Image (cartoon, rainbow, N blue to C red):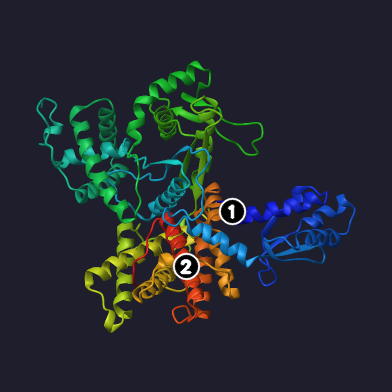
């Protein structure tokens, strides 16, 4: 169904056109003075000079034209030329009834895109053999929410974790493992049998091996040379090393999947840098043959600067002087692979905003060399830093980088204690249910705490604020949904049927305010995806939750004696619940039945 604001604007355009004025001046916006009106149009003031009339005169003409329009309850012209609009209660109720008819599909009037597209999102970026830490949080939750928005709107969304699995860290692990367990068959060049199916390490051992090897390489040049040689041998077909590498990948991916699942984050593709390697030789050949790549100071580079640049954009390096590839090479080859395999209309990279220059080089190189056509969009969505209360990147109390699973566990424990200490004696949960609900609330706290901030902005990760049941937090949103569920359950338990309810005309300002917020749903989801801005959905559901709670506190819902009025209230609550649940699902978390 059409967005409410579009329907109002179209009506305003018709009024302008009927009076001989250009439609472009008829733009309608949500009022910035809700105490005066619900919507407003300021076009009369912009039009005055061209029309050679006073703004108020034009506004009064428009108000007169719309005075008997069924869409509006009130249209008034006020100095110096504003048009203040209040929507008809009947029109609004009818609009919500149409939304409610879409409840079974859980779309609530939000249409799918006319031309679905294939869109890929690169939003993981973990290195194998290393645990996920808090620095991986933003990419994961922002990318997941954008993917879910795109799916909801009908696009084919393909998320790729894009692991770091092919660089020096592999050689470091192999070198350290060889020193510790030299008798393993992987290090015997004469061994011709099948290698063991079980890996010679656990994920815990692997996570200890890598930092140990990395630290050794920083102080021991001979050790580093061995690691570099091991990396070279791996990448050039050493049979034993490649078998070890497969073990590293499997153990790491199993652990990554477990931790991403805990975040309710998933990927359609578990590709790594290694998957792009076969595409590099042909890609380099084409760049050379096309006259794009040339040798500069021994390295193979492609110029990507443009005449309009206001700052220096260095060439994109393709191969180092020794012929070795770089991250640029791998990322470009990955685009080649993605275009050949999926031919997406857009590829979105959800990465640290400090990498903007790097991706500018890569994107320009991909466009210039024909890896992607002009109709394929390469999008950089840079996110800011997650900081502690001291304003510095979030750390443990000891000053180290905190594991993501540690952060989640700490917040789950905090929520569990809140649940146990605040529950009523006659409604006590068993321990399993309390832990399950604590995990749900904790996830809402973490995800909403992150996503409610504009992606490009740094923000303070304040555990105490994010876990509060009051204010602009995930737990507050869940508490609102649980409150609605409780009312609806009591209504049904009293022998009533939710299917027999429908939204009627508002009987109070708080009821109409809630109806207006619900009606914004489809417009919010569409604009949030268009702008790749999950924070817009967060802002919307916070306003919606506030409107619901204001209505709840002012209205006797279950005690209402007028049956038809009570049914209208219940229908509105049920619709609000549905919209809130769809929105939090898009954000990547869910609500329990009780808290």
Q: Is residue 578 above or below residue 224?
A: below
Question: Residue 3 bears which disc, if any?
Answer: 1
Q: Mark 2–mark 1 contact, CB under 8 Å?
A: no
Q: Alpha-carbon neighbours of circle 1 within 10 Å: few (<14), some, or many (≥20)?
A: some
Q: Would you say residue 458 is visible in this rendering? A: no
In the rendered image, the residue lying farthest to the right is 52
Question: Residue 330, located in which quarter of the rendered image?
Answer: top left
Q: Nearer the viewer, residue 361 or 155?
A: 155
Disc 2 designates what residue?
571
Q: Where does the image place residue 317, in percent across and percent down from the top left? A: 48, 30
- Relative to 234, 340 lies left or right: right
Question: Residue 359 bears which disc, if any?
Answer: none
Residue at position x 53%, y 54% from top? 522
Q: Nearer the viewer, residue 478 or 195?
A: 478
Q: Where does the image place residue 345, in percent across and percent down from the top left? A: 49, 34
Question: Residue 169, located in which quarter of the rendered image?
Answer: top left
Q: Alpha-carbon neighbours of circle 2 within 10 Å: few (<14), some, or many (≥20)?
A: many
- Relative to 489, 385 lies left or right: right
- Could you say whether the residue bearing mark 1 is in a helix, strand or loop? loop
| Measured Cα–Cα span from mark 2 to mark 1 | 21 Å
Q: Is residue 35 above or below residue 399?
A: below
Q: Is residue 396 above or below residue 232?
A: below
Q: Where does the image place residue 576, in percent across and percent down from the top left? A: 48, 65
Q: Name the front one of labels 2 and 1.
A: 2
């Amino acid at each position: 169904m059409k967005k409410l604001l579009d329907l109002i604007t179209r009506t305003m355009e018709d009024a302008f056109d009927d009076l001989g004025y250009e439609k472009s001046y008829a733009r309608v916006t949500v009022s910035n003075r809700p105490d005066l009106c619900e919507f407003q149009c300021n076009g009369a003031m912009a039009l005055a000079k061209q029309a050679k009339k006073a703004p108020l005169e034009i506004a009064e003409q428009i108000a007169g034209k719309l005075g008997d329009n069924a869409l509006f309850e009130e249209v008034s012209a006020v100095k110096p030329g504003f048009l203040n609009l209040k929507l008809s209660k009947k029109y609004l109720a009818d609009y919500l009834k149409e939304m409610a008819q879409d409840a079974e599909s859980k779309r609530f009037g939000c249409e799918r895109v006319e031309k679905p597209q294939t869109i890929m999102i690169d939003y993981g970026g973990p290195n194998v053999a290393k645990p996920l830490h808090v620095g991986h949080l933003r990419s994961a939750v922002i990318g997941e929410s954008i993917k879910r928005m795109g799916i909801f709107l009908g696009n084919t969304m393909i998320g790729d974790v894009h692991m770091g699995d092919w660089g020096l860290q592999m050689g470091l692990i192999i070198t350290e493992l060889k020193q510790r367990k030299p008798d393993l068959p992987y290090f015997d060049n004469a061994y011709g049998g099948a290698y063991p199916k079980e890996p010679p390490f656990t994920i815990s051992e692997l996570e200890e091996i890598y930092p140990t090897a990395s630290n050794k390489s920083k102080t021991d040049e001979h050790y580093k040379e061995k690691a570099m040689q091991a990396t070279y041998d791996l990448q050039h077909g050493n049979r034993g090393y490649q078998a070890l590498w497969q073990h590293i990948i499997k153990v790491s991916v199993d652990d990554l999947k477990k931790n991403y699942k805990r975040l309710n984050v998933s990927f359609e593709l578990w590709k790594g840098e290694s998957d792009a390697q076969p595409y590099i030789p042909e890609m380099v050949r084409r760049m050379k043959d096309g006259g794009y790549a040339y040798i500069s100071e021994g390295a193979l580079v492609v110029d990507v600067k443009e005449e309009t640049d206001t700052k220096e954009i260095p060439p994109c390096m393709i191969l180092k002087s020794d012929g070795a590839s770089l991250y640029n090479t791998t990322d470009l080859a990955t685009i080649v692979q993605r275009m050949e395999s999926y031919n997406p209309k857009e590829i979105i990279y959800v990465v640290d905003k400090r990498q903007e220059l790097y991706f500018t080089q890569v994107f320009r190189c991909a466009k210039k060399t024909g890896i992607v056509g002009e109709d394929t969009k390469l999008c950089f969505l840079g996110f800011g830093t997650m900081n502690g209360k001291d304003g510095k990147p979030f750390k443990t109390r000891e000053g180290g980088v905190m594991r993501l699973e540690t952060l989640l566990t700490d917040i789950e424990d905090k929520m569990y204690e809140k649940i146990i200490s605040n529950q009523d004696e006659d409604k006590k949960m068993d321990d399993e249910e309390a832990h399950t609900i604590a995990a749900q609330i904790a996830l809402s706290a973490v995800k909403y705490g992150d996503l409610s901030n504009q992606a490009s902005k740094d923000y303070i990760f304040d555990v105490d604020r994010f876990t509060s049941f009051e204010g602009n937090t995930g737990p507050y949103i869940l508490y609102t949904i649980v409150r609605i569920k409780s009312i609806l359950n009591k209504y049904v338990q009293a022998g009533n049927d939710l299917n027999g309810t429908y939204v009627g005309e508002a009987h109070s300002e708080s009821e109409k305010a809630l109806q207006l917020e619900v009606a914004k749903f489809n417009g919010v989801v569409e604009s949030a995806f268009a702008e790749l801005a999950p924070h817009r959905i967060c802002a919307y559901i916070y306003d919606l939750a506030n409107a619901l709670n204001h209505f709840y506190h002012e209205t006797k819902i279950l005690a209402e004696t007028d049956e038809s009025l009570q049914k209208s209230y219940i229908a509105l609550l049920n619709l609000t619940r549905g919209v809130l649940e769809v929105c939090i699902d898009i954000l990547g978390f869910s609500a329990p039945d009780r808290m």
